[in-house]
């Protein structure tokens, strides 16, 4: 867990800017317990990617409310949408691995609405377009 916290604290990983280490650790443990944390190590054993994603019911949550405080929201297996948040990938192949991990974790991902927080705002993505775009980026 210590390695993951240090990775999140790196200056270039702005999504955790201003978070004290103990809050980052609590956040990561919350997502471990929810089984909504994914991370990737490189061949040297260094953390190169991390993200959280959880299922929710989009009819009960307005997109604007996804920004605050989504990071402590328990996953809802009956939900019709997935929110990917705090996604950090140091290379395109890492992003592909993280997204692939989520497709395994959410077997109905093709039928779920997909949201991510981009520049502080919720954005809805077409899952297939996102997968194709990531595949092209990772293979160029």
Image (cartoon, grey):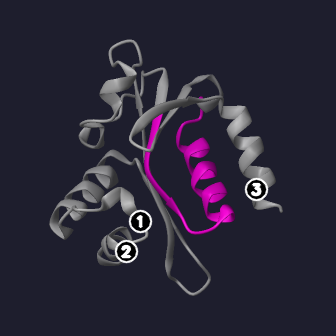
Secondary structure of residue under mark 3: helix
Q: Quadrant of residue 5?
A: bottom left
Residue in front for this viewpoint, 124 or 36: 124
Residue in front for this viewpoint, 32 or 117: 117
In this rendering, position of residue 15 left or right of residue 107? left
- Reading the image, the residue beneath label 3 is 137
Q: Residue furthest top?
A: 59
The residue shown at (73%, 34%) is: 129
Secondary structure of residue under mark 2: loop
Q: On screen, 11 above or below 19?
A: below
Which mark is on residue 10? Answer: 2
Q: Residues within 10 Å of mark 2 (few under 14, many from 20)?
A: few
Q: CA distance from mark 3 to mark 2?
A: 24 Å
Secondary structure of residue under mark 1: loop
Which mark is on residue 111? Answer: none
**Position in image of residue 79 (x %, y %):** 43, 22
Q: CA distance from mark 2 to mark 1?
A: 6 Å
Mark 2 touches mark 1? (CB < 8 Å): yes
- Which quadrant, please, contains the C terminus? bottom right
- Which quadrant, please, contains the N terminus? bottom left
Q: Residues within 10 Å of mark 3 (few under 14, many from 20)?
A: some
In this rendering, position of residue 40 left or right of residue 94? left
- Reading the image, the residue beneath label 1 is 13
Magenta stretch, residue numbers: 83-108
Tally of numbered tags:
3
């Amino acid at each position: 867990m210590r390695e993951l916290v240090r990775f999140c604290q790196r200056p270039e990983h702005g999504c955790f800017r201003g978070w004290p280490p103990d809050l980052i650790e609590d956040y990561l443990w919350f997502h471990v317990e929810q089984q909504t944390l994914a991370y990737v190590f490189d061949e040297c054993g260094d953390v190169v990617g991390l993200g959280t994603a959880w299922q929710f019911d989009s009819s009960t949550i307005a997109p604007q409310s996804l920004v605050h405080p989504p990071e402590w929201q328990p996953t809802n297996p009956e939900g019709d949408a997935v929110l990917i948040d705090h996604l950090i990938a140091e290379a395109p192949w890492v992003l592909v691995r993280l997204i692939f991990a989520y497709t395994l974790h959410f077997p109905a991902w093709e039928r779920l609405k997909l949201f991510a927080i981009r520049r502080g705002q919720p954005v809805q993505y077409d899952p297939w377009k996102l997968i194709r775009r990531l595949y092209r980026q990772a293979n160029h």
